[in-house]
Image (cartoon, rainbow, N blue to C red):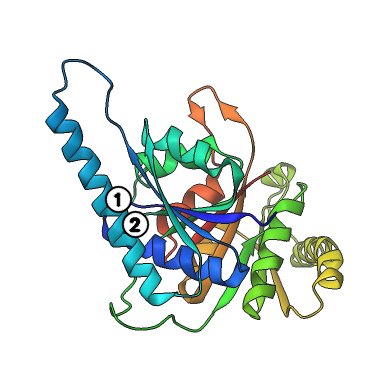
Amino acid sequence: MKHHVTVGVDRSPESRAAARWGAREAALRQVPLRLVHAVDWPDAPLIPRPGRETADRWADEVLTDALEDVRRRYPQVEITTRCLSGRPAAALAAEAADAGLLVLGSRGLGGLVGFLIGSVSLSTLVATETPVALVRVTDEPDESGPAPFGEIVVGVDIHEAADRVLSFAFEEADRRGCALRAVHGWKLPAAYAYVPFLDPDSEREISRGVTQMLDDMLLPWRHKFPAVSVTHNAFRGSAGHQLVQAAAGADLVVVGRHLRRSPLGAHLGPVAHAVLHHAAAPVAVIAH
């Protein structure tokens, strides 16, 4: 059975961009698109019925507007709608369980320092193991067609098993017929902090070793997807900063997140955190 693409909609500009991006993705995958809207309406006798009817009517309008917009742009895609009941994050995470991809809108913070991508998006992201794509509002004219595909950028940690992340990135590049760029940032071992100065030859040797490890990690995927043109870049510095810069001309940025929780809640990791907040391109987060 083919997995569908699910998009959460709420009539915001961000969700409209997410619905259009999700429809384009469904067309690429040749799978159905499901538009969902979550209504957090308490089932309490003190809430008058007319208020609930208003909420239901609003939900219907939200879904109808999104459906008409994407159907006009992608008439070949099979589209269904569903109204969910409950806390939006929990409802969306449950809905994503049988989806191949969940797509949500995200405001992003540009160059500002912040810690939220939107409470619903963040809570949903860490509550599901389904790949989640977060989409920004673009400057694309409202009636223009889809822009040509750019490259796929993927952040790779050579010290972790990254099969799910690389599989997703290579499949996306293969569908689009576009190039894939793998990025890895490395730091000197902690022991080097006590060395008065670093021999340039030693740094070059470390860089060559890291680059070779990255190349070795990509090799099986190059063989599996021979049509995908792959470049890779291992550099000394922050992977998050480099990925944000690469996102400027990318079609999609792919990053991983660990399936673990910190004492203070879900943990994204510094690279995923930086990319989600500041990357201009859509970002796909893959749990692994």
Q: Nearer the viewer, residue 90 or 244?
A: 90
The image quadrant where one finds the C terminus is top right
| Disc marking residue 10 | 1
> Which residue does the image show at 49% across and 27% down from the upper left?
265
Q: Earlier in the sequence, mark 1 or mark 2?
A: 1
Spatial separation of the CA atoms under disc 1 and disc 2: 6 Å
Task: Report the number of numbered marks.
Answer: 2
- Disc 1 marks a residue whose amino acid type is Asp
Give the residue pinned by disc 2. Answer: 15
Q: Nearer the viewer, residue 217 or 221?
A: 221
Residues at circles 1 and 2 in contact by the CB criterion of under 8 Å? yes
> Which residue does the image show at 14% across and 32% down from the upper left?
51
Horizontal and vertical percent position of residue 5: 54, 57
- Disc 2 marks a residue whose amino acid type is Ser
Q: Quadrant of residue 154?
A: bottom right
> Which residue does the image show at 41% across and 44% down from the upper left?
121
